Amino acid sequence: MEDLYRENILDHFRNPRNFGTLEHPDFSHEEHNPLCGDKLRIDLQVDDDRVTAVRFSGKGCAISQASASMLTEMVEGKTLEEVKSIDKQDILDALGIPISYVRIKCALLGLKTLKAGVYGVQTWVEEDNEQDIGW
């Protein structure tokens, strides 16, 4: 079963969904993982409190890029409240393989970027406060 998930991760890495930028996003945020150098930007267009378009761009390892691609598929068409409810476990479930402590920040970079953009956080909060915004 893990082989199917690994193939899915590689497919999202090689053929990312919703890759690029939006010309006039309603929400846009960039984050990076200073430990490994992964960088990610997520743009959202929202109409009537519902995500109508989402794009991500950046560079990084297969885990960070695949999880960002999967995340964009999760949020398209959702309300902002539904987007805010996506959490760490949703990402880990989508990846479907055990993620080591060293790679967890890679796997969650997309979620961190998305949440910071939706909540309007200019500088990301310290890890001790991450629970306050639902992840």
Image (spheres, grey):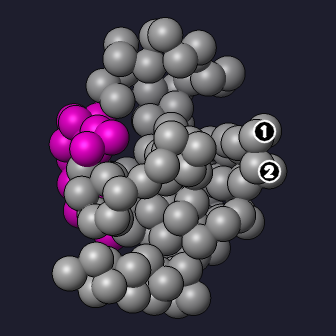
| Point 49% across, 84% down: residue | 10
The mark found on residue 5 in the picture is none
Instruction: Look at the image and tell me whether residue 93 can be seen.
Output: yes
Which amino acid is tagged 1?
Answer: Pro
Element type where label 1 sits in the image: loop
Q: Compared with residue 76, is residue 81 higher up or lower down, i.e. above or below? A: above
Nearer to me, 21 or 111: 111
| Point 78% across, 39% down: residue | 34
| Figure quadrant of residue 59 | bottom right
Is residue 81 covered in magenta? Answer: yes
Mark 1: few/some/many CA within 10 Å (<14, 14-19, 20+): few
| Figure quadrant of residue 74 | bottom left
**Residue 55, percent across and down?**
52, 66
**Residue 25, percent across and down?**
56, 54
Which amino acid is tagged 2?
Answer: Gly
| Point 33% across, 40% down: residue | 88
| Point 30% across, 25% down: residue | 134
Q: Is residue 114 left or right of residue 96?
A: right
| Picture quarter with the C terminus | top left
Element type where label 2 sits in the image: loop
Instruction: Look at the image and tell me whether residue 54 can be seen.
Output: no
Residue extent of the magenta highlight: 73-89
Asked if labels 1 and 2 touch by Cβ distance under 8 angstroms, the answer is: yes
Q: Compared with residue 64, is residue 62 higher up or lower down, i.e. above or below? A: below
**Residue 83, percent across and down?**
28, 44
Residue annotated with mark 2: 37
Kindly report the distance in space between the C-alpha atoms of the residues bearing marks 2 and 1: 5 Å
Q: Is residue 125 left or right of residue 90?
A: right
Mark 2: few/some/many CA within 10 Å (<14, 14-19, 20+): few
The mark found on residue 34 in the picture is 1
| Picture quarter with the N terminus | bottom left
Q: Is residue 106 left or right of residue 4?
A: right
